Image (tube, helix red, strand yellow):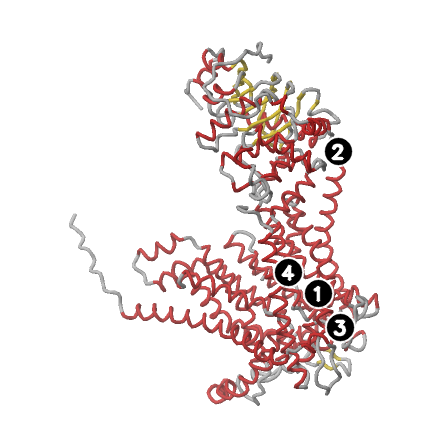
Amino acid sequence: MGVAIEVRELNAWYGKNLALKSIDMKVPANHVTAVIGPSGCGKSTFVRCLNRMHETIPEARAEGDVKVGEMDVYGGGSDPVEVRRRIGMVFQKPNPFPTMSIYGNVAAGLKLNGFRNRKQMDELVERSLRLAALWDEVKDNLHKKSGASLSGGQQQRLCIARALAVEPEVLLMDEPASALDPISTSKIEELIFQLKQHYTVVIVTHNMQQAARVAELTGFFLMGSLIEYDKTEKIFTNPADKRTEDYVTGRFG
Amino acid sequence: MHSIAAPATKPLSLGRKLVNHGATAFAILTAMLVLVPLMAIFVYLLIKGVGALNWAFLTQTPKPVGEAGGGMANAIVGSGVILAIASLIGIPLGIGSGIYLAEYGRNRFGDIVRFTADVLNGVPSIVIGIAAYSLVVVPQKHFSAFSGGVALGIMMIPTVARATEEMLLMVPNAVREAAFGLGIPKWRTTLSITLRTASAGVITGCMLAFARVAGETAPLLFTAFGNQFWNLNPNQPTAALPLQIFVYAISPFDEWHKQAWAGALILIILIVGAVAAVRVTVSRGRLKGA
Amino acid sequence: MNPPQPLGELPKRVTSIPTLAKGEHQRQPRGVIAALEKIRHSRPRSSRTPDALFRFIILLSAASVFGIVVLVVWELIAKSQLSLHQFGIKFFWGQDWDPVNGSFGALPFIYGTLVSSFLALLLAVPLSVGVAVFITEMCPQGLRAIISFLVELLAAVPSVIYGLWAIFVLAPLLRDYVEPFLSKTLSWTGLFTGPAYGLGMLAAGIILAIMIVPIIASITREVLVAVPQNQREAVLALGATRWEMIRMGVLRNARIGIVGGIILGLGRALGETMAVTMVIGNRPDIAKSLFAPGYTMASVIANEFSEATGDLYLSALIEIGLALFIVTLIVNALARLLVWSITGGQSARANA
């Protein structure tokens, strides 16, 4: 149900600053791939290039070849809006729509894509909330409580449900648990583990233990380049590149 | 190095204490002096206004000079018509400009628009009246509620635009990003997400603009011009409440003076009532915890 | 890079699998499967044209603001041409306003506008600064909200209602008590001579003062609040009384902004029409006494515009309007410059 991602020679700029240098990477379907690296290494930029969010920043641009399944993300005829609809994103700080109810938040993507059938929407909302492990906690208050009234961890799961509701093929997560407490974090990690049955997940994290817990593959970024990309176990126990070893053993970053 | 003796601390001199107390007294005095006229105005409005207020006042048109009775019903309705036209002009243009300034206009042209909106805000209302006269009344060759609405609408724009821009800028960027991430196009994000999040503040801004122009008289003097009779045709001279108050107040007739007070009371009630009504509806539309 | 063959399960520290979605596929009711199919295959319509169209409409509304101001200025200039050509620059110091004989001189109105506005400032500035200082520095917390609300309420009262109150309450008060008193005590200044009608320059100045207090007070409050707390503490730590702290630590820092607020109040006073028209007496005379009736630029337009006979008359009035526009433009621009230099940003209050 998820699809593979193939990245070739991806470059990205902030103004004149080259932030990503010719990245090549293949992400397999239905796996969790972690992207790690020190602050400023380009890992968030990389992930935001996959769904063309990078270019929403003024003066930012990206060039290269990115294929998500059969979709050519940067191809000549491709529409960024459609790309973003087919790729889901969860951000670092939970950002539910403040004026909408819980139901409204999850359904937002559906409504704005023209979904009208109320019964089908109800069912999809329930399904998304169940997938995000939030259903039992909110099922009595779907329409009455606003998205912003939930706790931090619940808000983030709400954002996950919102992203899942439009049935993306790939789920990108930019440090999804870094703003949360340890218990919420472990709930999110359990969730990610489950989600890979249905989706391909790419998760950015600065927390190496998290990468080890959750991901099967890990890519190490440094100063805009992909240094090493391999099975998580290998990256953390027997990395091939000295810089990777220095990072995972804590010598820097 | 010899030790430095600690300077003998002088007790606080009487002079300084007196000045301090005097300053406090002065400040309190000014506060009272400022509030006295406010109280006085509201008290007089109530006393003199209620005295002349009756059902006839609210439902009848003015009677000829010398006859007792009559009312300002046509002026109240006329104001409604003029303000409706003004809102139709001022609110969309104001919100549109505000959206531009917040979402698209962080550039040179945006600065120019912001500056001109400020200029427009500072133009005396009578000068706007002259412009509306020149632009609408002269080509049409007659006074009209429409030209009055144009004048007032122009005056609403800067307030609405400024409020809209400020409120939109307060919406955190994370909310826009969430919408983009879902694949919602920019126009939809701006309208359904960003503007909606800021809606309470924007509506309040529109309300403030409305309340401000509802009491304006000067621009109507030679646009709507006033009318002693019923008129619902926006293309004809129309009565307006502030205009009627003015005409009656400067007239030499006691009966009209009384009605001027009643009209003023109605005007204040309508303005305050409209603002309060909007505040209530806006807060009721909120969800728990929003 | 190519990943190596994906492994099977890695040993995980996650122990409990949440109770969601076991055997999810089997439990899916038919409706949801249909909905899933629909959403998976829906293609969003291209958003390029709607986005461009929306942007265009928004740009148009912003441009319209610019356009309106240009139009206003254009009309003012164009319709003043007749009078400008006829009288030239002498228009502004001609003392003779005689519509019947076709001679128009604007000096009485300029004089009236300046005198009434400056009188208003004289009265309003101490009051506004005093109230602002009271609210921000001296007032107990609970009272603060009420008093500032009441002061802002003053700003909401329409001009015509101020005028109404001024005609029937203020003017009689002046006529019966204040002006006789001033006449007895201060007539040697030459400012308080002549018959006491109540209506006149003094009444106009006073009602204007009441009207501009809220503006000056609210800007002053903003700049006072913008003074960082450490400035106050530094002065207090030197052993200053509260007033000395306010004078040295707060007012001194806020000076520029307060001046900006005052100038903004001046701008408002210059353009104020209705209340002034109702009490100033509407006589185009230049008199030294404040008891005498006068005439302002805004008032003459308000009174005579709709009855102006002849193009020259109208053009003269419009030229006065143009002058008023330019003066308020300069004054307001100056004020905003000063206020922004202190508060560093936009202030919604300035539009009160």
Depth check, mark 2 against mark 1: the one in front is 2
Q: Circle 3 is placed at which residue position? A: B225
SS of the residue under disc 2:
loop
Subunit of mark 1?
B
Give the mark nearer the N terminus: 1 vs 4.
1
Tag shown at residue B250: none
C-alpha distance separating marks 1 and 4: 15 Å
Disc 2 crowd, CA 10 A, few/some/many (<14, 14-19, 20+)? some
Q: Position of residue B54 (x, y in %)?
A: 66, 78
C-alpha distance separating marks 1 and 3: 15 Å
Subunit of mark 3?
B
Subunit of mark 4?
B
Q: Circle 4 is placed at which residue position? A: B209
SS of the residue under disc 3:
loop
On screen, residue C134 versus residue B215, left or right, reads left
Q: Do callouts 2 and 1 mark residues in contact (Cβ within 8 Å)?
A: no
Say whether mark 3 and mark 2 are on the same chain: no
Give the mark nearer the N terminus: 1 vs 3.
1
Task: Examine the image and state in which quarter residue A90 appears.
Answer: top right
Q: Circle 1 is placed at which residue position? A: B128
Up the image or down, B144 lies above or below A176; here it is below
Say whether mark 4 and mark 1 are on the same chain: yes
Q: Circle 2 is placed at which residue position? A: C46
Mark 1 is on which residue type?
Ile
Mark 2 is on which residue type?
Ser
